[in-house]
Amino acid sequence: MKTMIATLALAGSLASALAAVATPAAAADDAKEKCYGVALKGQNDCAAGAGTTCAGTSKIDYQQNVFKLVPKGTCLSMKTPDGHGMLEQGMAPA
């Protein structure tokens, strides 16, 4: 009986610890947004359009059809030589 109680207590503690670890990670993801047109060449976060397959594949600086994850609410205020960051993909520069 004592072993069962100890096992249940340990299982409960483990479940609580796992829930506590998972929550900040989910909150961190929610605190970011995709910002198009601000990534430097090869520093995009993932595929977003023609010419990209995944993270780090952008071919030019500030490519408007690739994104970088940035803190939520900061994208539109980011300035680049080609303009401001965008919350939706733009057209790839010619």
Image (tube, rainbow, N blue to C red):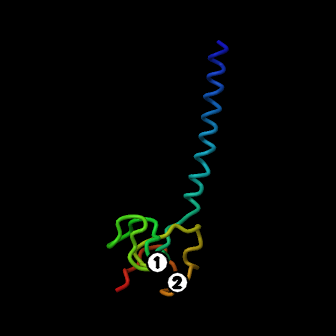
Q: Nearer the viewer, residue 42 or 13?
A: 42
Q: Residue at x 59, y 73 (%)?
A: 74
Judged left or right of residue 34, residue 48 is left
Check disc 1 and give the amino acid type.
Gly
Q: Residue at x 63, y 43 (%)?
A: 20
Instruction: Describe the element under mark 2 as helix, strand or loop.
Output: strand
Residue 78 drawn at (x, y percent): 56, 79
Residue 30 drawn at (x, y percent): 56, 59
Q: Residue at x 65, y 32 (%)?
A: 13
Kindly identify which residue carries mark 2.
Answer: 80
Which quadrant of the view contains residue 65?
bottom left
Q: Is residue 34 above or below residue 23?
A: below
Q: CA distance from mark 1 to mark 2?
A: 8 Å
Q: Residue at x 59, y 40 (%)?
A: 18
* CA neighbours of label 2 inside 10 A, class few (<14), some (14 to 19), many (20+): few
Q: How many marks?
A: 2
Is the Cβ of the residue at disc 1 closer than 8 Å to that at disc 2?
Answer: yes
* CA neighbours of label 1 inside 10 A, class few (<14), some (14 to 19), many (20+): many
Residue 38 drawn at (x, y percent): 50, 77
Residue 47 drawn at (x, y percent): 38, 66
Check disc 2 and give the amino acid type.
Thr
The quarter in which the N terminus is drawn is top right
Instruction: Describe the element under mark 1 as helix, strand or loop.
Output: loop
The quarter in which the C terminus is drawn is bottom left
Give the mark nearer the N terminus: 1 vs 2: 1
Q: Check the image and name the residue furthest to the left.
A: 50
Kindly identify which residue carries mark 1.
Answer: 37
Q: Is residue 20 above or below residue 44?
A: above
Question: Residue 54: which numbered mark, if any?
Answer: none
Which quadrant of the view contains residue 75?
bottom right
